[in-house]
Image (cartoon, helix red, strand yellow):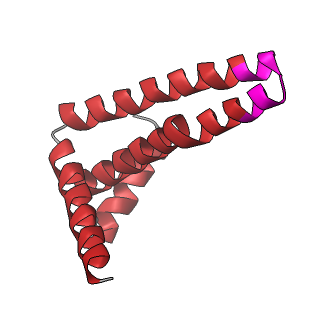
Amino acid sequence: MSLFCALIIITISVAGCDLEEIAARCLELAIEGETYEYTTMYPEFAEAAKQDRDREATAEFEAQTAELQEHAQIFRKAAHNFGLLTSIEQHHARQYIAIRSCVRTK
């Protein structure tokens, strides 16, 4: 373990933070970020490059889209392997319920 990692663990422990909760949140944010990038951001970049008739940029953005999808899957697998997916899924379920209740009240 590096000194940097050890210092982070000590800092988190002293602050009274739950390491599992932090790991779950980090993976959740990584999954959300990668998913946004491969479902929205890079496809939009690729479409703009297509409209500009820039084949090289289009190919790069499409390749990045596939790579980002792989990253999101790796993070999902890590969350599952560490038993953290359940808390991530619960978080998303809570968000869904909150959004659904907001939509119903409008």
User: Of 23 and 12, which appears nearest the observer?
Assistant: 23
Who's the residue at 51% across and 29% down the image? Answer: 68
Who's the residue at 62% across and 22% down the image? Answer: 62
| Image-quadrant location for residue 16 | bottom left
Q: Does the stretch in magenta take in 49?
A: yes
Who's the residue at 35% across and 52% down the image? Answer: 9
Q: Position of residue 27 (x, y in %)?
A: 35, 44
Locate residue 73 relative to residue 19 in the image: left or right.
Answer: right
Who's the residue at 60% across and 25% down the image? Answer: 64
Please say whether residue 101 is visible from this viewpoint: yes
**Most common secondary structure along the magenta stretch:** helix
Classify the position of the C terminus by image quarter.
bottom left
Picture mark count:
0
Above or below 103: residue 72: above
Instruction: In the displayed orientation, state which residue is furthest to the bottom.
Output: 105
Q: Position of residue 1 (x, y in %)?
A: 39, 34
In magenta, the rendered stretch is: 48-58
Q: Does the stretch in magenta take in 37?
A: no
User: Of 59 and 77, which appears nearest the observer?
Assistant: 59
